[in-house]
Image (cartoon, rainbow, N blue to C red):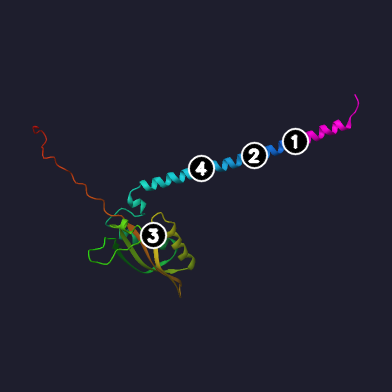
């Protein structure tokens, strides 16, 4: 059999082209598979987010508005919770004062109600405010604030002010949390027919 270098060269070139094509197809297939996996993951996360959103919408108002059920000792528990948080991070409460506000509908002839969106939905809710002055190391005061932000219970803060003292830093602010309205009383209806009475 006669050696034909041109034929062998054509075979080698064809093999190289085939190998290159197979490699390109394999890389494109891998990229397509990765993209498909990313799309599937994104769809799954979107579905989970929708399910969580639907679950939140189905919850009672005290859950949707981040308010706790109304209890007679809620204000006392709030102050105790703040004291425990301060003690845990090494800061001292040097002054405090608490008061409550209940969201109400405007009275006839009175000033107009707050026009903020959703404010009417808060009618009946109570806000417990605590005016605090805390003293301690700067990092400890930052930790105290971070703990309030990260809590499951909703806390809002306003009138935040920093000051320097001989013992370190002083932080004064108003911290608030919210209480849901008391559940409506259920009324039992009577039919007027005593048990065992003959029906007409």
Circle 4 sits in a helix, a strand or a loop, which is it?
helix
Q: Secondary structure at mark 3?
A: loop
Give the residues in magenta.
1-16
Residue 43: numbered disc = 4
Q: Does residue 123 sit above or below 195 in this rendering?
A: below
Membership of 99 in magenta stretch:
no
Tell me which corner region of the image, top left, top right, bottom left or bottom right, holds residue 94.
bottom left
Quick one: label 1, few (<14), some, or many (20+) residues within 10 Å?
few
Q: For residue 30, which numbered disc appears in the image?
A: 2
Which residue, given by chain and number where applicable, does mark 3 sit on?
155
Quadrant occupied by the N terminus: top right
Q: Are the residues at dot 3 and dot 2 in contact (C-beta closer than 8 Å)?
A: no
Disc 4 or 1, which lies upstream in sequence? Answer: 1
Which of disc 3 and disc 1 is earlier in sequence?
A: 1
Sequence-wise first label, 3 or 4: 4
Q: Residues within 10 Å of mark 4 (few under 14, many from 20)?
A: few
Image quadrant where residue 109 sits:
bottom left
Q: Residue at x 91, y 26 (%)?
A: 2
Residue 124 percent across, percent down from the top left:
28, 57
- Image label count: 4
Q: Secondary structure at mark 2?
A: helix
Nearer the observer: mark 1 or 3; the answer is 1
**Could you tell me if the residues under marks 4 and 2 are in contact, i.e. CB atoms within 8 Å?**
no
Depth check: 129 or 140 in front?
A: 129
């Amino acid at each position: 059999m006669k050696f034909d270098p041109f034929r062998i060269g054509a075979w080698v070139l064809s093999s190289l082209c085939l190998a290159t094509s197979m490699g390109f197809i394999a890389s494109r297939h891998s990229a397509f598979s990765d993209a498909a996996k990313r799309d599937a993951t994104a769809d799954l996360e979107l579905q989970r987010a929708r399910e969580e959103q639907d679950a939140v919408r189905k919850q009672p108002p005290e859950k949707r508005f981040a308010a706790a059920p109304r209890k007679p000792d809620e204000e006392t528990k709030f102050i105790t919770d703040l004291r425990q948080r301060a003690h845990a991070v090494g800061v001292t409460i040097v002054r405090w004062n608490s008061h409550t506000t209940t969201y109400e509908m405007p009275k006839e002839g009175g000033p107009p109600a707050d026009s903020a969106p959703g404010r009417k939905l808060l009618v009946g809710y109570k806000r417990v405010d605590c005016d605090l002055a805390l003293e301690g190391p700067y990092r400890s005061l930052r930790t105290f604030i971070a703990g309030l932000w990260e809590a499951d219970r909703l806390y809002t803060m306003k009138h935040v002010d920093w000051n320097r003292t001989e013992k370190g830093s002083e932080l004064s602010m108003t911290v608030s949390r919210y209480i849901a309205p008391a559940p409506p009383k259920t009324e039992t209806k009577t039919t007027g027919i005593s048990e065992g009475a003959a029906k007409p």
